[in-house]
Image (cartoon, helix red, strand yellow):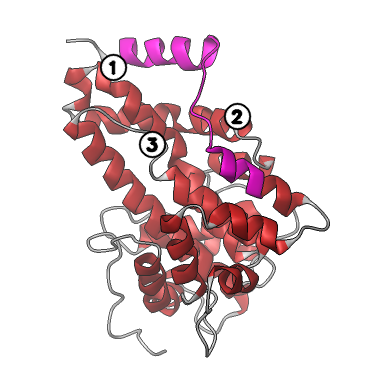
């Protein structure tokens, strides 16, 4: 049996210390992002690109009618959905959509672990996005994408562990390797795809509750609070510190809420998060735990 230290070192040498070709994003994803970055862009250009992918088109139309963007009248077509979501947000949604199938696994165990990681990431991303609605200064699409990317390194690493049967057959071993290398591999993927550095910084500060580098509430602060709430609602993952002790919380608008404890804030987000997870094609069962009845409606 190959030890975890040997496996970790082999992965470091292969993926970090040596030139390695990481998976690339599909061409239409990059093209849409390039168009969205322009100061002026003709909407029909983006529509014509996206409508070639029927699955993606349907996904955007569903999202446009989700709790994040819902209006009294549903969007009539793909163009209406993009207008409602916004061009820049649409480019991030597309990236979210393609990530799910970007890292194919060969073994059943690898696919199982990757699927579980994806579902947790999707639920966490939905919660972070709904939380952003209550902040105002954080874009909901950036909150969703940054949260989804926090474990992108682990999603990719599992594909490499297919070469180590003893490791992939042990969930604890897989978790150990992913916890050790997720940050650095995730950051390399962000750089490969030429995404904003803000997303890489969110990965690097994951679970760093004492983070305090800016006086103004930013995406890192938001991601930490969302992560805290996500972990806090499950007794098995509940952090040992208090939400009120986080420097990020003391910069947030939540400190001024009448009920600013983690359980009550979470209860405020719960129903909409469930709806958004469903709209995104995820499954929150066993991941999101209903808040105590004693705090519902308060």
Label 2 Cα crowd, 10 Å radius (few <14 / some 14-19 / many 20+): some
Whole-percent x, y for residue 27 in the image: 57, 38
Q: Which residues are magenta?
A: 4-32
Q: Is residue 105 left or right of residue 157?
A: left
The mark nearer the N terminus, 3 or 2, is: 3
Instruction: Inspect the magenta stretch and tell me whether residue 5 lies in it.
Output: yes
Quarter of the N terminus within the rendering? top left
Q: Is residue 105 placed above or below 99 in the rendered structure?
A: above
Q: CA distance from mark 2 to mark 1?
A: 27 Å
**Residue beneath label 2, please?**
192
User: Contact (CB < 8 A) between labels 3 and 2?
Assistant: no
Among the 4 quarters of the image, the one containing residue 162:
top left
**Residue beneath label 1, please?**
4
Q: CA distance from mark 1 to mark 3?
A: 18 Å
Q: Residue at x 23, y 63 (%)?
A: 285
Q: Is residue 108 left or right of residue 131?
A: left
Nearer to us: label 2 or label 1: 2
Residue 155's disc is: 3
Q: Is residue 162 placed above or below 114 in the rendered structure?
A: above
Res. 105 visible in picture? yes
Q: CA distance from mark 3 to mark 2?
A: 15 Å
Q: Is residue 28 placed above or below 84 in the rendered structure?
A: above
Label 3 Cα crowd, 10 Å radius (few <14 / some 14-19 / many 20+): many
Res. 223 visible in picture? no
Whole-percent x, y for residue 152 in the image: 45, 39
Q: Is residue 284 left or right of residue 222?
A: left
Q: Residue at x 52, y 60 (%)?
A: 225
Is 179 or 243 nearer to us in this picture? 179
């Amino acid at each position: 049996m190959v030890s975890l230290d040997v496996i970790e070192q082999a992965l470091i040498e292969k993926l970090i210390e040596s030139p390695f070709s990481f998976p690339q994003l599909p061409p239409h994803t990059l093209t849409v992002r390039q168009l969205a970055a322009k100061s002026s862009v003709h909407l029909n250009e983006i529509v014509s690109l996206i409508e070639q992918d029927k699955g993606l088109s349907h996904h955007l139309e569903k999202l446009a009618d989700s709790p994040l963007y819902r209006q009294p009248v549903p969007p009539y077509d793909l163009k209406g959905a993009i207008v409602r979501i916004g061009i820049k947000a649409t480019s991030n949604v597309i990236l979210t959509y393609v990530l799910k199938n970007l890292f194919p696994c060969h073994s059943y165990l690898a696919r199982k672990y990757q699927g579980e990681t994806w579902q947790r990431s999707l639920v966490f991303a939905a919660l972070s996005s709904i939380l952003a609605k209550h902040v105002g200064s954080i874009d909901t699409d950036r909150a969703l994408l940054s949260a989804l990317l926090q474990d992108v390194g682990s999603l990719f690493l599992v594909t490499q562990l297919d070469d180590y049967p003893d490791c992939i057959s042990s969930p604890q071993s897989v978790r150990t390797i992913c916890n050790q290398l997720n940050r650095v591999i995730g950051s390399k993927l962000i750089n490969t795809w030429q995404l904003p550095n803000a997303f890489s910084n969110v990965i690097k500060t994951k679970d760093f509750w004492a983070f305090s580098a800016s006086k103004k509430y930013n995406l890192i602060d938001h991601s930490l609070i969302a992560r805290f709430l996500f972990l806090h609602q499950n007794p098995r993952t509940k952090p040992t510190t208090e939400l009120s002790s986080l420097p990020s919380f003391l910069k947030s608008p939540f400190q001024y809420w009448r009920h600013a404890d983690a359980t009550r804030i979470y209860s405020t987000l719960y129903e909409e998060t469930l709806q958004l997870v469903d709209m995104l094609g995820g499954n929150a069962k066993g991941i999101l735990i209903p808040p105590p009845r004693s705090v519902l409606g308060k």
